[in-house]
Image: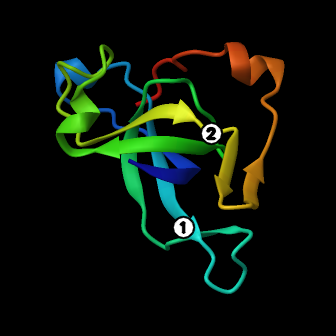
Amino acid sequence: MFIARITGSLVSSQKVESMVGQKLLIVEPLRVDEQDQKSLKGTGRSFVVVDTVGAGEGEIVLCVQGSSARYTPETKTLPVDAAIIGIVDQVQVGSNMLLNQSAPAATATRRRGGGQG
């Protein structure tokens, strides 16, 4: 698993039938900043992921890759290699709080964002 920030979305007009209606997002994995151990920093890499939780651009999310991406009820029949499985509210490493955001009501109750992908 890894945490990432959603940086964009992807639309594909031609795809296999099982992917129709799946929301595809672009994420950049995050890591602890070496210069400032109290913040997260992007890695500069990007991944396309299927969104199973209704996340939105700019949010910090929990992602899985490989066969783990197909272990959710939403993805078990999909040809995917990476999936969002959660929206992150807090990240704490040791005594350092790297992320602490309370989810707005719309985010907390939102599920499966619907079909852009």
Residue 53 lies left or right of residue 36; in this view the side is: left
Labelled disc at residue 88 = 2
Q: Which residue is mark 1?
A: 31
Earlier residue among tags 1 and 2: 1
Q: Is residue 23 above or below residue 73?
A: below
Q: Is residue 38 above or below residue 100?
A: below
Q: Is residue 43 above or below residue 108?
A: below
Spatial CA span between label 1 and label 2: 14 Å
Residue 53 lies left or right of residue 78; in this view the side is: right
Residue 99 lies left or right of residue 60; in this view the side is: right
C-beta proximity under 8 Å, tags 1 and 2? no
Residue that sits furthest to the bottom in the current view: 35
Q: Position of residue 17 (x, y in %)?
A: 19, 19
Q: Secondary structure at mark 2?
A: loop
Q: Residues within 10 Å of mark 1 (few under 14, many from 20)?
A: some
Residue 35 lies left or right of residue 75; in this view the side is: right
